[in-house]
Every structure is written in structure tokens, then in C-alpha cells.
């Protein structure tokens, strides 16, 4: 399988994702009890406005035509106009997106920077105190309600110690607490998988042979064990994107972080449906592309994928 | 001084809270340039013994006593740094399954030259030498194969690469743990020939671990027969095979399948009789339950190691016979 | 690829011995005792507490923990201890129903896809691919935001995120099982597909879904309370752990115990379910039991 067909296949996959997300949203919007035009206009809008909206969104057209128009709009990134601010949805989402990406990347960086070494160390020193610390952190991290952790961190660092801001994104240190909060649920599975795969790889014959041929322990671990263990760890890192997104929505709300997640939540309460739809559409699209990027990373690590399997 | 001297080596596996004895006071020595084969069935402790030589034994193995002297250094008490010096240059290893003993993520050339580089070779020098090593183990087109990944080679070729890694630093001893068991019969013969050729060329000692007495016959000067963690019989290959003294050796010789080995030309009249039962790890001789010639004493006391000419035997019945002959 | 070994398959008939094996391991014991103590408290809370979880006494508002109010009182003067365990009851109910619905529907759809094959299989699996490709939180938010935050909708939202995983799990195993002798024998006897699927195949593969279900309970309770925290869960004044923390977040400096206690209970519940789920998987799945050693 060549590199081109790999990407073609994945791009078709993304197209399917985008299509299904849009159809899902379309069905959802049409299944709202009551008149969608009235919902879009707001409950106390005068009938003329409702009628205007009905025409503007083509709600008088037959359903298949509505779907076709809707899809056409999405393909041209015409995500509509915010009911609340009357600005194009795409602009608003794009202005918030950097914050979400910044928060997610910072959290992922912390999770990887702590999780992989911790898991590896726990495996190398199995049954030591650090191993128990790693296992405990894994269990608690998986079970931790993100919003509660966030509030506890605010309580400790912002309210008690007064050394870090409790929310917003005004100062450079604003990122610290949200990033820490969001990193924990992502760190837990990374640590767990690293520990597990390290233990597996350490038992492999090729590790035994690498030692036997006179390599230094450092070389054996960093060159052979680490790289082989990275393949499953990479899978788990890739799977964390969903976790990260869920965490981002909640963490952004806790810390009043001006990202897309908070935009979605705020828009829900403002009944700004075009905004909710548009933001979710963009998030799903990004999610699909990140997964594509993760899959391409495998090829960089594993020659068996790069060159095609089999002798 | 002998190259390798194993003295009274005892070890157990820790399985849960249980201890399972795997080596019982094993004695073994190898001279420079000598090829020694350890023959035994699975569970005899032969592979455990091999892994201890490089101190790469499984985590749950407990070494309970004895010494492993390599050029006078006791590997049992040696520190990690000393061991790193012995590994590769002093002793190297060939493992059973060539598919799992090479790292799938690096080219075979890299896996040879990294060992050279870590032991004093320059980058280009290591690469040149690695290509030469590939050529010497019979890999066709070695310059091109240098850049192949393990999954692109056949099983036999992978084992040749593993042998190239094993001889890379011209070690004094190669431990080959069932090097041919995972290969098909015709490849087996080629690998054994290759090992014989290389050990002769470099005057390297070889410790061959195998369950196949035919393979042992083809590739050793001396044979050590193990059963139940004990050395049963030890002697010159030709003599042991022609005239086995221990009942277990006779049994092994009688039960070999007719392979490609030169051993089939031998006329054997070994007893085919064997009793049902399992190898016992209790007080007495481990072969007691299965032995057609066992006596009361065999069940109670482990046999002593006695020397008969060039041979070392652990068997009460054999000992009694020797004593009778002397009288 | 998952391999099933039916000879060593732990049948559901031996629930007792399964329970004993779980209780024997340390993590299993911690999981069982933490979950069951909170479940027990949330069942008897109406009996042991003299306070009303919804109507409060404003004169008693925002009292710090004391003997009469072990967790303190909230901004409307309601006893937090009472509300916490009523809230735990709601959270437990939602996550059980949500995970149960997801597991049930996913298993049945996976069974259909795997057993029927062909076009049904293809369509169902493409739907599952599509669902898997959207983060479950977004599906849940979109559902609850448009349909409204009722108990039913929250349960559906949680179930939606879990369905595709069960579909894949079940389909994978059914494809293997349907070629086994006992299924072929049932076909030769002329039994209907429905009967074979639900009477013969399903009982033999349900152990997989059941152990996955316990593993998912911890996640479901976090999802339910997360939605509650965002204001998309059970609406006040009804107590739910996430909703309670969400409405108390403005009091983080003034009355931190309003956040601390419900959160701790939530953490213990999620932790307990995870430990329990891991143990059940290890006990029920012979292949992972080997890894435990």
C-alpha cells in the first residue's frame, strides 16, 4: 500500500465523518420539539421575524432540498450567522480556536512529559514506591471529575495562596491551572499504557539480545525499548483526543477560558443554535484531522507500516 | 585456566510463593576453542543455564549458590558494569527464535553496527565491518541487505543476521540457545554448518543448547546431558553417543527422529524401554520415575557426580557397576 | 484480534464464585466496598436524614460542617449531607440507565451485524464508524442542548457515546462464534435466526458486554456529572452531584465544602467502579487473568 492511497483512504474517511456529523446535526435540529424558526428567532420574537428567519434558512422548502442546501453551505464553510451576536459563526469559532488549541496542546504536553517517563520508570523499577505512585495516579486520574479538580486547584492556588489567577486568559500564568487540570485525565492512560508496554517490551527477545551484544543499558532502553513501546503509547495518545475535547469543554467553563468549548456552552444557554452547530462541526473536523495526523505518525515510527508488512 | 567454569550452580524459579528447583549443583567447564553441547528436554534447566551465563535470566529466577567463572571473573557476583564488558566481547548469544530476537524497528545493518560502535568502532568502520559480517554469514548482496528490516528477511536469513551479531566483536564464547529449532530442516543443516565453520575460523568456543541430540552430535566436541536440573552424563561427543552409560542418555539416543544428522549412521542398540511417569524433583534422582533400571536408593538420594575415564556420570546404578568392575 | 476460548469461558451461572474471586483481590475489595457503601448510604438517606433535600431553611444558609450538618449547608440552607447522597442516587441512576441502554443497544446491534452479515452488517458498522468519529461529549452536548435537559435525554446522550464500542465488541466475537458447531447444529435443526441469536449466541457472549459495562460505569458517572456541571444535566433544585458542584462553583472561596464533599463522593464512586470493572474484567476474561500474574 503506497503512501498516496493511505492518505486518499483517510481523506475519504474524513469526508464520511464530516458528512455524518452534518447529517446528525441536521436531523437533531429538525427533531427539536416545536418550530425551529421560532427557536432560532427566540421565543418572544414577533411573527414577522419568525417568518423572515423561516425564509432565510429555507425552512419552507421540502426536507431533502433543505438537507442539500445545508450540506452545500457546510462544504463552503458557510456556517451561518450567530443569533446572539449577528456575526458569522465561522469568524467567531476561528477567533476562539487558538485558545482551545493552546490549552489542549499545553495539557497534552504536560501529560506526555510526565506520563511517559513516569510509566517507563515505574516499569523499570517494578514494585518500587514510584511504581505504586504511578499506579495510584493512574487510578485516580481516570476517576477524577475534571471540573472538581479544577475548582479544587482554584481553591488552593487562587483563593488560599493567591499566587495564580482563578480564570480568564489575561495573564501568561492563566494557562497553568487549566492546563494542569486538563492534563490529569490524559496523563492517566498514557502512564498506564507506557508502564504496561514497557514491561512487555522488556521481556522481548530482542531486548535480551540487545543487552547480550554488549550495548549499554542506556542505549538498550532509549533506543530499543522506548521506540518499540512508543507504538502502543502513540495509539493511546491518539485516543486521548476525545478525552481532551471533553476535558476542554469542561475545563474552559471552570476557568472562564475563552475557547471553543466555552463558546459552545455559552451558546447553548443563549439558544444560539447556529453557533452551537458550527462550533461542533469545526471541532469534529479538527478531531478527524488530528486522528489522521496520529495515524501518519505510526508510519514514521514503524517501518513495517511504512514499507508494507510481510517479507 | 579454563575459559568458562561453572561450579555447583543451583537455582530455583519463584512461582507465586512456591519455589521450583531448576538447577541442582550443576558443574560444567568449557575450554578455549571447544564446542560443548548441552542436551536435554524442555524443563531440564538447559535454557535457564544459558540465560545465567549472560546474566539475562528471567526476573523470577533465584540463583541460590555456585559460581560462574568466565576468565576468572565470577559473573554471579559481578556488577552491571563488569557484565556489560563481558557481554558481546566475552560471551555473545544466539537465541532460538530469529523473528523475535531482532528489533523490528531498525535495519539489520544498524543492529550489527550499533554493537560495533558501542565497542570502539567509528561510524564508517562499523558499517564496513557490518557488511563484511553479513557477507561472512552467507547473506547474499550484503550491501543492499544492510538496509533491510527484519520483516523483509526469511527465518534462515534472520538467524544468519543473529549469528553475524553474535560474532561481531569476536567473542571468546558463543552461547547458542536452540539456534535451529525454529527453522526448517534444510535451513537447520546450513546454520549448523555455518556455526561450525565460524567457530573453527575464529577459534571461538561454542556452548550449544539443544533438545536434539542429532544437532548436538553434528556441532560439538563434548556433550553434556541434562535432566531435571542435573547433569546426568558428560563426555566426548563421539564416546557418549557410541557408548552411553547413563540410562537417560540411552533413552535420548533411542528416541531421536531420523533427521539429517550424521548420527543416524551410528548403529544403536540402546534400550527403548522407558516407564511412564514424570520427572521428579524430590530428594532422589530426577529420572527415577522413568528409569527402567532404578533401584530403591535412586528414590531417596540424589546421585553423586563420579568420573569414569573421560566421562562424568550421575547415576547410582552406573556407580555400582564401576565399583564392581574395579573390584 | 480477540480470541475466545470457550472451554475456559466463565459462565454466568457461577456468579457466586465470580464474586468470591473479585472480593479476594485487593483492588476488587476496595472497589466493592467503596461503591457499596455509597450505594447503601444513598438508598437509606431518606431514613437516616431528618432534612428535606429540596426545601431548605434560608436562616441556616451556608453553615460550615458541624455535628448537625456533617457536610454543612448550601446557599438555600439545605443540608449538604442529605443532598449529596440524594445526588449520588441520581448520578448512579443516570449512569446505570445510560450505560445499560448503551450496552444493551450496542450488543444487540452488534449481534445483528455479526450474525446477519451482508448489507445489514455494512450499514450498521458504517453508522458505528460515524458515531466513533465524533467525540462523545459533543454528541451528548448536541443532544441535550437541542432536546432539553430531561432525565431521558441525559440517559440517551450517555448511551449514544457508548453504543459503537459495544457494537464492535459484540460483532467481533459473533463473527467467530457463528461458525462454531453448536450454532451450526442449531441451524441444521431449523431454528429461526432470531432464536439462535438470542437464545444460543447471546448468552455465550454476554460476559464480554457485562464486564465492559462495569468498566464503563465509572466513565458514565463522570459524563453524567460533567453534563450536570455544565448545566445540561438534572436541573436544580433536584440534587445531582455534578449539578450541585456546578451551582456551588461561585461559592468556591466562601464555602468550599459545598464543592469538596459532593466531589469526593463522585471521585470515590468513579474510582470504585473503575477498580471493580478492572477486577471483573480480569476475573471473567481468562486471557487477561494470565497477565495479572
Image: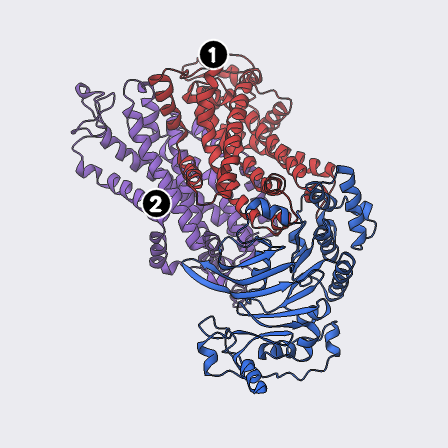
Chain colours: A red, B blue, C purple
Secondary structure state at the residue bearing disc 2? helix
Q: Residue at the spot x=77%, y=46% of the render?
A: B130
Q: Secondary structure at mark 1?
A: loop
Q: Chain of mark 1?
A: A
Can the viewer see residue A31 in this picture?
no
For this rendering, which residue is in front, A291 or C52?
A: A291
Report x, y in % for residue C251: 30, 19
- At a point 44% along the width and 72% down the height, the residue shown is B283
Looking at the rendering, which quadrant does residue B163 occupy?
bottom right
For label 2, count other residues whose C-alpha is less than 10 Å away and answer few (under 14), some (14-19) or many (20+).
Answer: many
In the rendered view, would you say B253 is above or below C63?
below
Q: C81 or C201: nearer the eye? A: C81
Q: Chain of mark 2?
A: C
Q: CA distance from mark 1 to mark 2?
A: 42 Å
State the mark number for residue C31.
Answer: 2
| Residue A285 shown left or right of residue C148 in the figure | right
Q: Is residue A211 found left or right of B188 in the rendered image?
A: left
Q: How many marks?
A: 2
Q: Position of residue A224 (x, y in %)?
A: 62, 42
Give the side of residue B290 with respect to residue C253, left or right: right
Question: Which of A201 and B177 lies nearest the eye of the viewer?
Answer: B177
Q: Residue furthest right?
A: B141
Q: Bin the neighbour count of mark 1 within 10 Å (Cα to Cα): few under 14, some 14-19, many 20 and up.
A: few
Q: Observer-nearest residue: B238 or A173?
A: B238
Q: Is residue B10 left or right of residue A150?
A: right
Specify the label residue A170 is tagged with. 1
Q: Quadrant of the C terminus of chain C?
A: bottom left
User: How far from the left and from the top, in percent, is residue A58?
Assistant: 56, 21
Can you tell which quarter of the image residue B144 is in? top right
Amino acid at each position: 500500500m503506497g503512501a498516496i492511497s493511505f492518505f486518499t483512504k483517510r481523506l475519504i474517511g474524513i469526508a464520511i465523518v464530516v458528512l455524518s456529523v452534518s447529517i446528525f446535526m441536521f436531523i437533531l435540529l429538525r427533531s427539536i420539539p416545536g418550530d425551529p424558526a421560532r427557536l432560532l428567532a427566540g421565543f418572544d420574537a414577533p411573527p414577522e421575524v419568525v417568518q423572515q428567519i423561516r425564509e432565510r434558512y429555507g425552512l419552507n422548502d421540502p426536507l431533502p432540498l433543505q438537507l442539500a442546501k445545508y450540506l452545500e453551505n457546510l462544504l463552503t464553510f458557510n456556517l451561518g450567522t450567530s443569533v446572539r451576536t449577528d456575526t458569522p459563526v465561522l469568524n467567531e469559532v476561528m477567533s476562539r480556536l487558538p485558545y482551545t488549541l493552546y490549552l489542549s496542546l499545553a495539557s497534552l504536553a504536560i501529560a506526555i512529559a510526565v506520563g511517559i517517563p513516569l510509566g517507563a520508570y515505574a516499569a523499570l523499577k517494578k514494585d518500587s514506591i514510584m511504581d505504586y505512585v504511578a499506579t495510584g495516579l493512574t487510578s485516580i486520574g481516570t476517576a477524577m471529575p475534571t471540573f472538581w479538580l479544577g475548582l479544587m486547584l482554584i481553591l488552593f492556588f487562587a483563593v488560599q495562596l493567591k499566587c495564580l489567577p482563578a480564570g480568564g486568559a489575561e495573564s501568561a500564568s492563566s494557562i497553568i491551572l487549566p492546563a494542569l487540570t486538563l492534563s490529569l485525565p490524559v496523563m492517566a492512560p498514557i502512564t498506564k499504557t507506557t508502564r504496561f508496554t514497557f514491561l512487555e517490551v522488556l521481556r522481548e527477545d530482542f531486548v535480551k539480545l540487545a543487552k547480550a551484544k554488549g550495548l549499554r543499558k542506556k542505549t538498550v532502553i532509549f533506543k530499543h525499548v522506548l521506540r518499540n513501546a512508543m507504538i502502543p503509547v502513540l495509539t493511546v495518545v491518539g485516543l486521548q483526543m476525545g478525552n481532551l475535547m471533553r476535558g476542554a469543554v469542561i475545563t474552559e467553563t471552570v476557568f472562564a477560558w475563552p475557547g471553543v468549548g466555552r463558546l459552545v456552552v455559552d451558546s447553548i444557554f443563549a439558544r444560539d443554535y447556529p453557533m452551537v452547530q458550527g462550533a461542533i462541526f469545526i471541532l469534529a473536523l479538527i478531531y478527524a484531522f488530528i486522528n489522521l495526523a496520529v495515524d501518519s505518525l505510526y508510519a514514521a515510527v514503524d517501518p513495517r507500516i511504512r514499507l508494507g508488512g510481510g517479507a | 585456566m579454563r575459559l568458562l567454569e561453572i561450579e555447583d550452580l543451583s537455582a530455583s524459579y519463584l512461582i507465586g510463593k512456591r519455589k521450583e528447583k531448576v538447577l541442582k549443583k550443576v558443574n560444567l567447564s568449557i575450554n578455549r576453542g571447544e564446542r560443548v553441547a548441552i542436551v536435554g528436554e524442555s524443563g531440564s534447566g538447559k535454557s535457564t543455564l544459558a540465560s545465567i551465563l549472560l546474566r539475562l535470566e528471567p526476573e523470577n529466577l533465584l540463583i541460590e549458590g555456585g559460581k560462574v567463572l568466565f576468565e576468572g571473573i565470577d559473573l554471579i557476583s559481578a556488577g552491571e558494569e563488569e557484565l556489560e564488558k563481558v557481554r558481546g566481547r566475552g560471551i555473545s548469544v544466539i537465541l532460538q527464535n530469529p523473528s523475535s530476537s531482532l528489533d523490528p524497528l531498525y535495519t539489520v545493518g544498524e543492529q550489527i553496527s550499533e554493537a560495533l560502535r558501542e565497542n570502539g568502532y567509528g561510524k564508517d568502520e562499523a558499517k564496513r565491518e557490518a557488511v563484511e559480517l553479513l557477507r561472512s554469514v552467507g547473506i547474499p548482496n550484503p550491501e543492499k541487505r544492510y538496509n533491510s528490516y527484519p520483516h523483509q528477511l526469511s527465518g534462515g536469513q534472520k538467524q544468519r543476521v543473529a549469528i553475524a551479531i553474535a560474532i561481531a566483536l569476536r567473542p571468546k564464547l558463543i552461547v547458542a540457545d536452540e539456534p535451529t529449532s525454529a527453522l526448517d530442516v534444510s535451513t537447520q543443516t546450513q546454520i549448523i554448518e555455518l556455526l561450525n565453520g565460524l567457530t573453527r575460523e575464529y577459534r571461538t568456543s561454542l556452548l550449544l543448547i539443544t533438545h536434539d541430540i542429532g544437532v548436538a552430535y553434528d556441532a560439538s566436541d563434548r556433550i553434556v546431558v541434562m535432566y531435571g536440573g542435573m547433569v546426568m552424563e558428560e563426555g566426548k561427543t563421539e564416546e557418549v553417543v557410541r557408548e552411553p552409560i547413563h540410562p537417560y542418555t540411552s533413552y535420548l539416543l533411542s528416541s531421536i527422529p531420523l533427521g539429517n544428522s550424521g548420527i543416524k549412521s551410528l548403529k544403536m542398540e540402546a534400550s527403548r524401554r522407558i516407564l511412564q511417569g514424570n520427572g521428579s524433583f524430590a530428594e532422589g534422582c530426577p529420572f527415577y520415575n522413568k528409569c527402567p533400571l532404578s533401584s530403591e536408593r535412586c528414590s531417596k538420594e540424589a546421585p553423586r557426580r563420579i568420573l569414569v575415564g573421560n566421562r562424568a556420570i550421575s547415576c547410582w546404578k552406573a556407580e555400582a557397576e564401576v565399583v564392581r568392575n574395579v573390584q | 484480534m480477540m480470541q475466545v476460548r470457550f472451554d475456559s469461558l466463565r459462565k454466568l451461572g457461577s456468579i457466586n464464585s465470580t464474586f468470591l474471586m473479585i472480593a479476594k483481590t485487593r483492588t476488587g475489595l476496595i472497589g466493592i466496598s467503596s461503591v457499596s457503601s455509597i450505594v447503601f448510604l444513598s438508598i437509606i438517606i431518606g431514613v437516616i436524614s431528618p432534612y428535606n433535600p429540596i426545601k431548605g431553611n434560608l436562616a441556616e444558609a451556608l453553615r460550615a460542617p458541624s455535628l448537625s450538618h456533617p457536610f454543612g449547608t448550601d446557599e438555600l440552607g439545605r443540608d449538604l449531607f442529605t443532598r449529596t447522597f440524594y445526588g449520588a442516587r441520581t448520578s448512579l441512576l443516570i449512569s446505570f440507565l445510560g450505560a445499560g441502554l448503551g450496552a444493551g443497544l450496542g450488543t444487540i446491534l452488534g449481534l445483528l451485524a455479526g450474525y446477519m452479515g451482508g448489507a445489514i452488517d455494512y450499514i450498521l458498522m458504517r453508522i458505528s464508524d460515524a458515531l466513533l468519529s465524533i467525540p462523545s461529549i459533543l454528541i451528548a452536548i448536541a443532544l441535550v442542548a437541542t432536546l432539553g435537559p430531561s432525565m431521558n435525554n441525559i440517559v440517551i446522550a450517555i448511551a449514544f457515546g457508548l453504543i459503537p464500542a459495544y457494537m464492535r465488541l459484540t460483532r467481533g466475537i459473533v463473527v467467530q462464534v457463528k461458525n462454531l458447531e453448536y450454532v451450526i447444529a442449531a441451524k441444521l435443526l431449523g431454528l429461526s435466526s432470531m432464536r439462535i441469536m438470542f437464545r444460543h449466541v447471546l448468552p455465550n457472549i454476554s460476559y464480554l458486554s457485562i464486564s465492559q459495562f462495569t468498566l464503563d460505569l465509572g466513565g458514565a458517572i463522570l459524563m453524567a456529572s460533567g453534563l450536570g456541571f455544565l448545566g445540561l444535566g438534572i436541573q436544580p433544585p433536584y440534587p445531582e452531584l455534578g449539578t450541585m458542584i456546578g451551582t456551588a462553583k461561585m461559592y468556591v472561596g466562601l464555602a468550599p465544602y459545598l464543592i469538596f464533599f459532593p466531589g469526593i463522593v463522585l471521585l470515590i464512586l468513579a474510582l470504585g467502579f473503575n477498580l471493580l470493572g478492572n477486577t471483573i474484567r480480569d476475573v471473567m476474561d481468562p486471557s487477561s487473568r494470565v497477565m495479572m500474574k
